[in-house]
Amino acid sequence: MFQEVIIALSEGFLKTLQIFFITLVGALPLGLIIAFGSMSRFRPIRSVMRAIVWVIRGTPLMLQLIAIFYGPGMLLGYNIWGTGNFGRNAAVAVAFIINYACYFSEIYRGGIESIPRGQYEAGQVLGMTRPQIFFKVVLAQVVKRIVPPMSNEIITLVKDTALARIILVYEVIWAGQTFIKKAGVIWPLFFTAIYYLLFNGLLTILFWYIEKKLDYYRG
């Protein structure tokens, strides 16, 4: 049985990793776009972006998963996600990307707004354009400041992937729980903790390394 458990947990964890990486690929750039929208001088855009962030951060991810997967079908009369695993995986990806993009946007916004205004003005005095000021003066400082809160959110994302099971996406905890029903044993479920601990341990080491590499700047 041990081999069967490891195979099942490994398959489930591959789905966990898939959700994790797809979320990062989509949420990191989308979060920056939302952050810029939240800081826009055009009030309607700023208000809309901040309202979206408020709603997403103020409601559970589990509720968002249910609403995104089942909502369109109930409102429009047909399931836009289609049937089968592909549709469920697509809904999970959309829900996770939107959720984490909103959280990342607030981290981006806090990092950008923490840079003293004088640095922008100094760049203008030197004849730099706004994009040049952002990418050559501001960005390195922002990255340094957002790494700790960003690492916390990313580690939280690893654990939040377990919520995908709410719309029947097979991930590592579901794989472990299956053996409770099938074989009447609980120890496989505890083995799922090892997968999470090992992966989160690797991420912790990675972010520690990144922080050390960024120690050249202590502003």
Image (cartoon, rainbow, N blue to C red):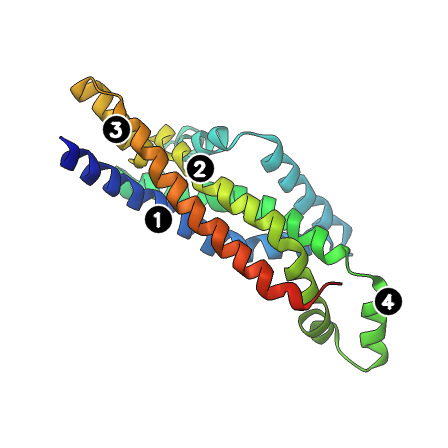
**Horizontal placement of 179 versus 74: left or right?**
left
Does residue 34 sit above or below 66 in this rendering?
below
Circle 2 residues within 10 Å: few <14, some 14–19, many ≥20:
some
Q: Which residue is more in the foreground, 190 or 153?
A: 190
Q: Which mark is residue 118?
A: 4
* Residue ID for mark 3: 188
The amino acid type, in three-letter code, at marker 4 is Gly
The amino acid type, in three-letter code, at marker 3 is Pro
**Whether residue 28 is visible:** yes
| Whole-percent x, y for residue 163 in the image | 41, 32
Does residue 38 sit above or below 9 in this rendering?
below
Q: Residue furthest bottom?
A: 127
Element under disc 2: helix
Mark 1 or 3: the one toward you: 3
Q: Residue at 28% of width from left, 35% of height from top?
A: 170
Does residue 140 sit above or below 70 in this rendering?
below
Q: Residue at 59% of width from left, 61% of height from top?
A: 212
* Residue ID for mark 2: 159
Q: Label 2 vs label 4: CA separation? A: 40 Å
Q: Residue at 70% of width from left, 69% of height from top?
A: 134
Q: Which of marks 3 and 4 precedes in the sequence?
A: 4
The answer to the question of whether label 1 and label 3 lie on touching residues, with beta carbons closer than 8 A, is: no
Would you identify the image quadrant in which residue 194 lies? top left
Mark 2 or 3: the one toward you: 3
Q: Label 2 vs label 3: CA separation? A: 17 Å
The amino acid type, in three-letter code, at marker 1 is Gln
The amino acid type, in three-letter code, at marker 2 is Lys
| Whole-percent x, y for residue 25 in the image | 46, 56
* Residue ID for mark 1: 18
Element under disc 4: helix
Q: Label 1 vs label 3: CA separation? A: 21 Å
